[in-house]
Image (spheres, rainbow, N blue to C red):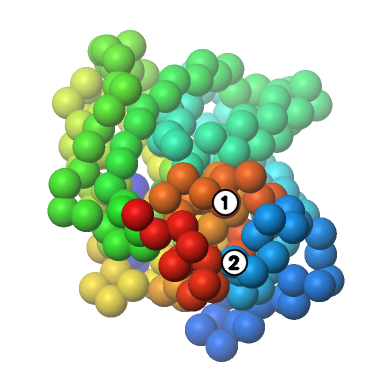
Amino acid sequence: MADNSENKSGSGDCGIVIRDDWPGYSLDLFTYPQHYSEDLECVYIPHGVIMDRTERLARNIMDDLGDHDIVVLCVLKGGYQFCADLVERIKTLNRNSSKTLPMSVDFIRLKSYLNDQSTEDLHIIGAENLSVLSGKNVLIVEVIVDTGKTMKTLLNHVEGFRPKMIKVAGLLVKRVPNGPGCLPDYVGFEIPNRFVVGYALDYNEYFRDLNHICVISESGKQKYKV
Ligand code: HPA
Ligand code: MG
């Protein structure tokens, strides 16, 4: 993780900044599952834009880490889609350039959110023995970083297995009060402090089956509250 004043990616790329006054796109301009028609306010980041941005992140990662071996550590559940798409684009680069990035992929599962609130207790579950990370170059792939608490806990956990290097790719970084303190090395988008769903980001496990990143509506929050 880079601290806030520094960007470790050689490209000087700190992510696409989405401003607080960005209203998103009208839902009518896109297709999405009709079972969510009452549950969303707007399309915040269309799926195609996520894909295009992911392609560029793959290139930045390749420029920095090419010719190293890496272990991609996918942070479940929310990170599965981003991780799959990012790995797919790195695979394309591996087939089309002289520099290549041999990868293995592993998984870790975290849970901290109930409704739209971060809970105090962060659970690391489903983590099998991560001693395979020892001495390796690890790329942690997380879909969203907001308070940074989850990321810090995870970094401590992973550091315990003594990897040679840890880099973090985060698709979204949320601008929250007292921000994350440290930022992923590779950032897709910096977004306002709004609760977003889709592209595997959930609200109580719903909305993972939505391609675009959208803002949930009040009625959506009520409907799927637990
Ligand atoms: N949406 C879904 N999950 C999250 C979010 C969000 O905005 N922030 C942290 N986890
Ligand atoms: Mg969640």
Identify the residue at image location x=56%, y=88%.
Answer: 21
- Between residue 9 and residue 105, name the one nearer to us: 105
Pointer 1 and pointer 2: residues touching (CB < 8 Å)?
yes
Identify the residue at image location x=49%, y=75%.
Answer: 218
Identify the residue at image location x=21%, y=43%.
Answer: 122
Q: Is residue 85 visible?
A: yes
Residue ID for mark 2: 39
> The disc labelled 2 sits on which kind of residue?
Asp
Residue 5 pos. (x, y %) = 33, 67
Q: Check disc 1: other Cα within 10 Å, few if <14, some if 14-19, many if 20+.
A: many
Residue ID for mark 1: 207
Task: Say which of marks 1 and 2 sits in front.
Answer: 2
Identify the residue at image location x=16%, y=53%.
Answer: 120
Residue 131 pos. (x, y %) = 26, 13
Give the side of residue 106 with respect to residue 42, left or right. Answer: left
Q: Element at badge 2? A: loop
> The disc labelled 1 sits on which kind of residue?
Phe
Residue 160 pos. (x, y %) = 17, 26
Question: Residue 76 occupies which quadrant of the picture?
Answer: top left
